[in-house]
Image: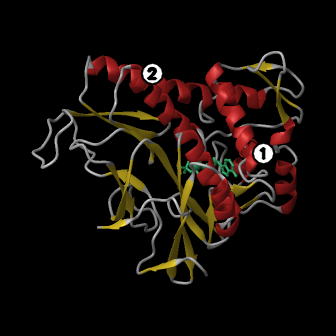
């Protein structure tokens, strides 16, 4: 496999902020480089995961900032959750076909971005995949202990397809489904958007140096505590390993978002076979091609998040070809081959420092 480098251990990748985890604000530790200010670490819960913000040189009211951050990411969850029956996305799922459905500006933006990424990836990413996600046991619906039949898959597929969703030309906040039973799942893009929404809060409050993370998807700005670039930990991946507990390496980044999608943490077993939570919306089946993990660097976390999932669907060769074509976006992927894991990255992906 050309261009791949062999790893000693089974490796998949997750991202964690090195040094995160302190409960309250701290001051700079002594450093040979000039400290840029005090470091503050804020936390909360959203979308079934934890959010973490590290900001440096805070200027203002910490409690007020925490509330503003929680409100920003909480609103994403309120509007876009598939687990909340009264979210905009859940109500849209219940709405009949060919009927205008008005949503908030943030939901409209995220769905329009989802549609753009679907077109870019020729349907590898598809937010209308919800009926298939439920059928394979990864959605809010009751999980069946047996694999779905071909007929069930065909029926669910008939209710999917991003081309069956349109926006009104008069009002960009009005969407309409052209197929009955079409439902949206923004799970592969909303966490990334939540990160971006929190970054907007920090930008509005003039924060220059920060790291924002929601469930492993993250974005950084400026520099870290001692004025050096942010270092992002890369997990040594073992099945079900907790985020950030075993680090394999680290990269240094600035002013960028990074998201990882993989098949080693969220999966179930059916008839002794591992079933990935990432579904190929073109076939109706979970992905199954040896790609263990994809990490994407992008200007926004929304793009990084969605493209990471899309690349898991595309597989290593097509994923690499797609990302090489896109300006300002880089990829790191890990492929299973027998007992070994092979890694490959695009030309602009940072050097991975072994820890
Ligand atoms: P995670 O949410 O576990 O971090 P991802 O960001 O890759 O992982 O999102 C995976 C989730 O997205 C799945 O659990 C499912 O709800 C949804 N999904 C699965 N396949 C697709 C797909 N091809 N396009 C868009 N969303 C998908
Ligand atoms: Mg994703």
Q: Position of residue 244 (x, y in %)?
A: 35, 56
> Percent x, y for residue 274?
61, 68
Q: Report if residue 214 is visible in the image.
A: no
CB under 8 Å between discs 2 and 1: no
Mark 2 CB lies closer than 8 A to ligand 1: no
77 over 291 or under it: above or below: above
Q: Nearer the viewer, mark 2 or mark 1?
A: 1
Q: Quadrant of residue 223?
A: top left
Residue 155 against residue 87 in the figure, above or below: below
In the rendered image, the residue lying farthest to the left is 30
Indicate which disc residue 119 carries. 1
Of residues 39 and 146, the one drawn nearer to the viewer in this rendering: 39
Checking the image for residue 235, the label placed there is none
Quadrant where the C terminus sits is bottom left
**In this figure, which colouring scheme has been used for the structure?**
secondary structure
| Mark sitting earlier along the chain (2/1) | 2
For the residues labelled 2 and 1, the Cα–Cα distance comes to: 31 Å
Q: Quadrant of the N terminus?
A: bottom right
Q: Does residue 299 appear anywhere in the picture? A: yes
Q: Position of residue 33 (x, y in %)?
A: 16, 46
Front one among 210 and 255: 255
Which residue is denoted by mark 2 in the rendering? Answer: 71
Left or right of 147: which side holds 98? right
Estimate the x, y position of residue 142 in percent, counting from the top left. 66, 46
Q: Secondary structure at mark 1?
A: helix
The secondary element bearing badge 2 is classed as helix
Please give the name of the residue rendered at 51% of the width and 59% of the height, measured from the top-left corner: 348
Label 1 C-beta lies within 8 Å of the nearest ligand 1 atom: no
Q: Report which quarter residue 283 is drawn in.
A: bottom right
Mark 2 nearby-residue class (10 Å; few <14, some 14–19, many ≥20): some
Q: Is residue 310 left or right of residue 75?
A: right
């Amino acid at each position: 496999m050309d261009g791949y480098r062999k790893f000693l251990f089974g490796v998949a990748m997750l991202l964690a902020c090195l040094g995160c985890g302190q409960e309250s604000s701290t001051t700079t530790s002594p450093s040979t480089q000039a400290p840029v200010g005090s470091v503050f670490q804020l936390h909360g819960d959203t979308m079934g995961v934890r959010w973490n913000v590290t900001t440096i040189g805070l200027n203002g009211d910490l409690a007020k900032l925490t509330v503003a951050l929680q409100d920003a990411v909480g609103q994403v969850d309120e509007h876009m959750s598939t687990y909340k029956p009264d979210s905009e996305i859940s109500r849209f799922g219940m709405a009949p076909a060919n009927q205008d459905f008005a949503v908030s500006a943030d939901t409209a933006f995220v769905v329009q971005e989802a549609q753009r990424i679907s077109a870019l990836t020729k349907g590898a990413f598809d937010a209308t995949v919800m009926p298939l996600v439920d059928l394979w046991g990864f959605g809010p619906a009751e999980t069946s202990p047996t694999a779905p039949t071909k007929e069930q898959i065909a029926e669910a597929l008939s209710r999917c397809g991003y081309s069956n969703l349109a926006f009104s030309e008069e009002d960009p906040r009005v969407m309409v489904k052209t197929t009955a039973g079409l439902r949206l799942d923004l799970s592969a893009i909303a966490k990334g958007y939540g990160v971006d929404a929190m970054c907007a809060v920090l930008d509005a409050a003039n924060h220059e140096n920060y790291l924002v993370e929601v469930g492993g998807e993250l974005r950084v700005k400026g520099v870290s505590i001692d004025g050096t670039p942010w270092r992002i930990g890369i997990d040594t991946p073992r099945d079900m390993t907790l985020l950030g507990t075993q680090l394999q390496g680290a990269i240094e980044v600035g002013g960028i978002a990074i998201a990882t999608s993989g098949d080693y943490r969220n999966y179930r077993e059916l008839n002794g076979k591992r079933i990935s939570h990432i579904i190929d919306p073109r076939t109706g089946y979970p992905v199954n091609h040896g790609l263990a993990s994809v990490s994407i660097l992008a200007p926004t976390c929304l793009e990084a998040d969605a493209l990471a999932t899309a690349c898991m669907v595309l597989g290593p060769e097509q994923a690499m070809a797609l990302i090489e074509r896109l300006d300002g976006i880089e990829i790191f992927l890990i492929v299973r081959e027998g007992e070994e894991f092979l890694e490959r990255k695009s030309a602009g992906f940072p050097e991975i420092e072994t820890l």
